[in-house]
Image (tube, grey):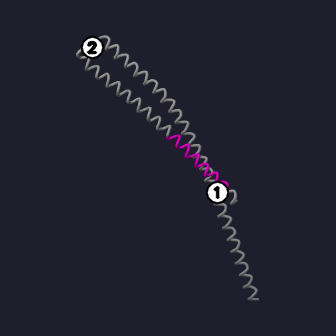
């Protein structure tokens, strides 16, 4: 069983490395999602700031050309935001996939750990049985010696 445990410890080390790698990939994907969310928020903030500036400038009036330029710029911002939102959805799907891989790697590690713990408990139980057997043999031998001395 000790040889089995040595092999299981090697497998456990491998499982831990796989779990750590999976966790790193999940964290990287999660950070990428956060980055895309920040970029989208920045686009929204920039768009609102531009609209506010144009409203202030519009109080003094501006040409049709400037209005078209303003509208064209807003359309470009909307297109950029739409592209970022699409990429965000892809990143979220990737993050979910990497989370599942991490959870599976964690489960695989725990299976090996529980198997090692089970082996440990079996060894302890076998030792206790062996000790009890030796104790019983000692008691029987001691009782036999006492009865032979009394006879």
Between the residue at mark 2 and the residue at mark 1, the CA separation in whole angstroms equals 80 Å
Image point (73%, 80%), residue name: 141
- Magenta-drawn segment: 5-27
Q: Nearer the viewer, residue 122 or 71?
A: 71
Residue at the top extreme? 64
Decide if residue 28 is on the left or right side of residue 126. Answer: left
Image point (25%, 14%), residue name: 61
Residue 128 in the image: state x and y as whole percent: 66, 67
Q: Quadrant of residue 43?
A: top left
User: Which tag, 2 or 1, sits closer to the chain's start?
Assistant: 2
Residue 82 higher or lower than 28, as above or below: above
Residue 51 higher or lower than 14, as above or below: above
Callout count: 2
Residue 122 higher or lower than 72, as above or below: below
Residue 62 in the image: state x and y as whole percent: 27, 13
Secondary structure category for the residue under label 2: loop
Residue 69 in the image: state x and y as whole percent: 35, 15
Residue 7 colored in magenta in the image: yes
Secondary structure category for the residue under label 1: helix
Q: Quadrant of residue 65?
A: top left
The residue to which callout 2 is attached is 62
For the C terminus, the image quarter is: bottom right
């Amino acid at each position: 069983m000790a040889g089995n445990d040595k092999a299981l410890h090697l497998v456990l080390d491998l499982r831990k490395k796989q779990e750590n790698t999976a966790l790193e990939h999940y964290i990287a994907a999660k950070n990428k999602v956060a980055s895309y969310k920040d970029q989208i928020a920045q686009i929204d903030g920039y768009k609102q700031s531009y609209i506010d500036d144009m409203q202030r400038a519009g109080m003094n009036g501006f040409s049709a050309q400037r209005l078209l330029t303003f509208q064209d710029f807003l359309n470009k911002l909307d297109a950029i935001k739409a592209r970022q939102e699409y990429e965000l959805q892809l990143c979220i799907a990737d993050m979910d996939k990497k989370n599942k891989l991490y959870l599976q790697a964690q489960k695989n590690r725990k299976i090996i750990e529980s198997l090692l713990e089970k082996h440990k408990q079996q060894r302890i139980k076998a030792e206790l049985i062996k000790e009890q057997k030796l104790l019983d043999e000692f008691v029987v031998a001691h009782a036999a010696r006492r009865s032979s001395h009394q006879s």
